[in-house]
Amino acid sequence: MTGFPDRPRRVRPVLAALVAAVVLTAGCTLPAFAPRAESEGEAAPPGTAPTWRSCPEVPDELVGRGAADMRYECARIAVPRNWGAGAATGATAGPGTGETFEIALIRARSTRQHDRIGSLVVNPGGPGASGVDTAVYLSFGPAFGGLPTTITDRFDIVGFDPRGVARSSPVKCIPDADLDASFGYQPDPESQASFDGLVDLNRRIGARCGKKYGDQLVLYSTEQAARDMDAVRAAVGDEKLSYLGYSYGTLLGATYAQLYPERVRALVLDGAVDPGQQLIAGSESQARGFERAFDNFSRWCAANAGRCPIAPDARGAVTAAIDKADAAPVRGADGREATAGWVFYAVISSLYTEQGWQELARAIDDLQGGDPAGVFRLADAYAGREDDGHYSNLFDANLAINCADEADRPTREQVRSLQSRWRQKYPLFGPALAVGMLGCVEWPGGRDPYPTGRATGAPPILVVGTTGDPATPYEQTAALASMLGVGRVLTWEGEGHTAYPQTACVTSAVDAYLISGTVPREGLRCPAR
């Protein structure tokens, strides 16, 4: 896997509340980003208005019901496979061939809507996560961790699955068994034989995807998806785009702003990705961010021993659990083994939100007692693995998009060297982030890097950063704002991945910007609570 995908934190609090409300499985608070059933109806040809149809079955499938006072409509639009920009012009589906991808859309409209401004297009990140699902989650309002009614009363909430993701011509080429092997693999394969085994696994994955998609793989790049997003803007009938992008969604939004600055109304980029970072720099940034977040968890654990059964030394307990799982994995009731990789990804999953800290402590404590259920619950939620062992296409799309975007890929030798160096600097997360780059090293597709310049002519763009963010570390916030030239930074001094709408301070600043274009004062920092 290439780094740790930017799992959208907005989803977790929504389902945590909704699960209780609709009496779903206790504790299952993180959704899998599974490809859902295709929406009915033909995709509207490029440049034509789509046909919207009522689709209450989408929220029914996701959470058991739709939000009160919300109507849901779905549509599909066709977009050119190749918009004819960047390196993707080398693909066989060149401009003007008539070959298309289908993009799935949903819009949630409040029955209380008044003084409508337009549509707020949302993207949850990943890359590979479903914007259709996320629009549904966000439609449930602040009581469930969704968007404020001040926003849903003025905007349609529009989600789309980017090309290759979930319902939008999904790319799917990695067998469930290979994903199981990848997630379960030793996160720091120190011996040469173990490292070579991981190389072989990634080579097998790349070869299978290359055989299925060939030179079409380059067409899943971020720049191509950003051009699709302008087709989404046109499909909802807005002259200019209002957009809320989380994590990788900030990169998608920044790319749009550079391509179509005159079509930007308001962009909120929350959990900023620095587009100037190449694969190695971005992976090291995540290693640093996750180490910092884990240190914060460890301090919380030591100060809250009553809620943290692995106190006072959480780092020691987690490290020991991973080492023990490598030597003698605990077997669950169904026969599945909690190997070092599964324990490691349970840790990763829990660090995306502060609410996950106590769950991680319990899972590690239970594992020490011989019960791996909590570890599997956390890790499977992160991986998008269902109870029957089937995976969504989150990580297929994640690889295809990330690897198409990368201008330069390291060699195996560079990866091996970085694994050793980062083990010293970032002992828990560095080696895994280093070997995670093997996914793109062994990937067969072409390259279509996104632009990294100013959004000249765009209005102010709000870039939101969280000081304790592990997946998109806070340092990237100012870098993205500076690159765009029109960015204004809003800081949340909190924990976890992304900020809006976590507190009254963050919410009021973002709402004012989205509704009236009011930009927060320079240097505004919102407290954690």
Image: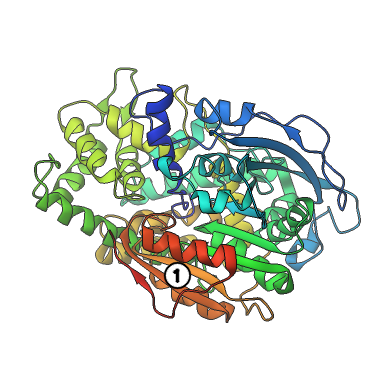
Using the image as rendered, state which of residue 514 and residue 417 is in the foreground: 514
Residue 63 to residue 102: above or below: above
Query: Residue at coordinates 47% horizontally, 21% vertically from top-left?
Result: 388
Query: Residue at coordinates 64% horizontally, 28% vertically from top-left?
Result: 56
Measured as percent of width and height from the top left, residue 448 is found at: 68, 64
Measured as percent of width and height from the top left, residue 397 is found at: 60, 46
Residue 143: image quadrant is top left
Query: Residue at coordinates 60% horizontally, 43% vertically from top-left?
Result: 112
Using the image as rendered, state which of residue 254 and residue 207 is in the foreground: 254
Provide the residue designation for mark 1.
281
SS category of the residue bearing label 1: helix
Q: Is 288 on the left-hand or right-hand side of 482?
A: left
Query: Residue at coordinates 43% horizontally, 80% vertically from top-left?
Result: 522
Q: Is 308 on the left-hand or right-hand side of 526?
A: left
Measured as percent of width and height from the top left, residue 138 is found at: 52, 44
Residue 44 to residue 257: above or below: above
Neighbourhood count class around disc 1 (C-alpha, 10 Å): few under 14, some 14–19, many 20 upward: few
Q: Is 453 on the left-hand or right-hand side of 224?
A: left
Measured as percent of width and height from the top left, residue 32 is found at: 49, 35
Chosen colour scheme: rainbow
Using the image as rendered, state which of residue 259 and residue 88 is in the foreground: 259
